[in-house]
Image: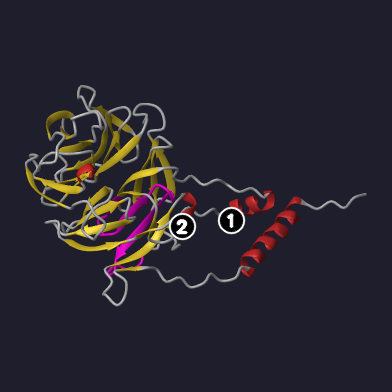
Amino acid sequence: MPYQVSSRLLRLFLAVLLLAGCAARPPAPEFSPPVYPPPPAEPRFVYDGTLRAASDFVQPDFGERLRRFATGSRETPLGMAKPFAVAVHRGRIYVSDTQQRAVLLFDLPGQRVKVIGERGPGTLVKPMGLALDQARGKLYVADVTARRIQVYDSEGEHLATWGRDVAMRRPVGIALSPEGDRLYVVDVGGVDSNRHRVWVFDTRTGSLAFHFGQRGVRLGEFNLPIHAATGPDGTLYVVDGGNFRVQAFDPEGRPLFAFGAPGRRSGQFSRPKGIAVDAAGRIYVVDAAFGNVQIFDSQGRLLMHLGERATRGGPGRFMLPSGCAVDEAGRLFVVDQFFRKIDVFRPATLPPWERLPLR
């Protein structure tokens, strides 16, 4: 009669093997995160971690680890396929993903991931720009293919669709006024269109308030604008990609000044894309060709840059960065489409953020 092993004894045996394997694992080599600017200069920012998928912060419990060990299964974590823009508030990271046709919510404090706009009312076709109304708990998403703005609550429940009666051609970037009463929508237009402009919506009614801009090279005109952000004083900054500059406007759309020029030196732009503004008014501009983020003061004077272009991934290494955001503590989140990741950088005065692993 063959020997029969009880299921309880088998589970105990597998648990011992699993724990033994964990105990035998060699310690990871000590990691020294990159700092910016590098020594001997005084560091201003420190690399703080990388987010790629749910498995970066959602840890399986003992039972799940045992099941995977026993069955030899490898779960495919919910992660980014082609991320574009990012918005962050209190550890809740929203990422638009054009390939998955959805917005992913990585809720680090809640240890969960949620998919927004995948089905039902507010289904997304090609989500790009994101804006968060933190006070009212609303998420705004620019859908470039549907030519609409979708509005959700902070959990992803659909609230409204804006822009059905507005002739938006390719809405890609959006920004919210500090008071939350206006939503600025950047329309990239296209090479065969002169409608390169910014549409302004009243967030209380969802109706169009006014628009400004046309295709051109003069101050107040655009050539393939792509992203926007607002400063704490209400200044609107628009990445004017085809003119290799950032333009500043007052809340009514009147041009104030511009900074940047085509080139390969610091303070110039080659392929500017994402933009963010922190609570102190500093402006962060992603350049997809440089593979870095340049930081300017509120008047467009260069302060420093961080990150580098690389063909192999790693901390602070980018191939196709596209969007960025700054949270309430001053952490910078940078999206890279090619490496399908978000790198996080903290001000050097902040302690390490332990929600993400260092890579």
Q: Position of residue 354 (x, y in %)?
A: 40, 63
Residue farthest top in this picture: 165
Q: Is residue 119 visible?
A: yes
**Camera-side residue: 291 or 120?**
291
**Camera-side residue: 85 or 114?**
85
Question: What residue would you read off at disc 1?
Answer: 62
Left or right: residue 214 versus residue 11 is left
Q: Is residue 188 above or below residue 285?
A: above
Question: What residue would you read off at disc 2?
Answer: 312
Residue farthest right in this picture: 1
Magenta residues span 324-352
Left or right: residue 27 versus residue 333 is right
Q: Is disc 2 surrounded by few (<14), some (14 to 19) or many (20+) residues within 10 Å?
A: few
**Image quadrant where one finds the C terminus:** bottom left
Q: Is the image coloured rainbow, by chain, by secondary structure, or in one colour?
A: secondary structure
* Marked residue nearer the N-terminal end (2 or 1): 1
Identify which amino acid the numbered label 1 is placed on.
Answer: Phe
Left or right: residue 252 versus residue 118 is left
Q: Position of residue 235 (x, y in %)?
A: 12, 48
Q: Element at badge 1?
A: helix
Depth-wise, is mark 2 or mark 1 nearer the camera? 2
Q: Residue at x 14, y 41 (%)?
A: 217
Q: Residue at x 30, y 51 (%)?
A: 324
